[in-house]
Amino acid sequence: MRSLKIAAIGRTLDRSYVSRPVDVRIEVDDWQAPIGLFGVLGDVTVHFDSPLPTTNRLRVLAQDLKADRATDVTAQVRIMPDRIILPAALIRRIGLSAAAPGDLSDPGLVVQLR
């Protein structure tokens, strides 16, 4: 199965690590492919080339890369007939949910539509 990966990589400027969120919009042809999100991201809009299943049946699951199980985040994303919008706050919260205290890693998570 194919998957999609989106990464926002920080930069070193004047001896400091800088990572600023930026909104991302991407077009995808397979709504069932897992989506990996890495780094500090703004809102992520995933636009599909065909309509999604009816919204009352569609589930959006998200999981920190270090976590053991996914969380149903369907109610926390915007679902439209041909796209979903993953809010920056959700990406950060889920992508750091399994981080240990003091862990300075950027968020990392996988999203799956079912």
Image (cartoon, helix red, strand yellow):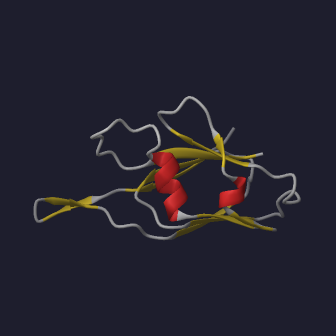
Q: Is residue 87 above or below residue 74?
A: below
> Where is residue 107 drawn, in percent x and y?
42, 49
Direction front: furthest residue:
101
As rendered, which of 63 and 4 lies closer to the eye?
63
> Where is residue 18 drawn, in percent x and y?
25, 62
Residue 55 quadrant? bottom right
Rendered residue at 49%/52% (across/down) = 93
- Residue 67 as seen in the image, left or right of residue 81: left
Residue 90 quadrant? bottom right
User: Is residue 44 visible to the viewer in this orientation of the structure?
Assistant: yes
As rendered, which of 65 and 26 lies closer to the eye?
65
Rendered residue at 11%/65% (across/down) = 14
As rendered, which of 102 and 14 lies closer to the eye?
102
Task: Pick the quarter of the image with the C terminus.
Answer: top right
Direction left: furthest residue:
15
> Where is residue 6 drawn, in percent x and y?
50, 55
- Residue 87 as seen in the image, left or right of residue 98: right
Q: How many marks?
A: 0
Rendered residue at 47%/43% (across/down) = 97
Task: Pick the quarter of the image with the N terminus.
Answer: top right
- Residue 18 as seen in the image, left or right of residue 38: left
> Where is residue 25 drawn, in percent x and y?
57, 69
User: Is residue 37 visible to the viewer in this orientation of the structure?
Assistant: no
Rendered residue at 53%/67% (across/down) = 43
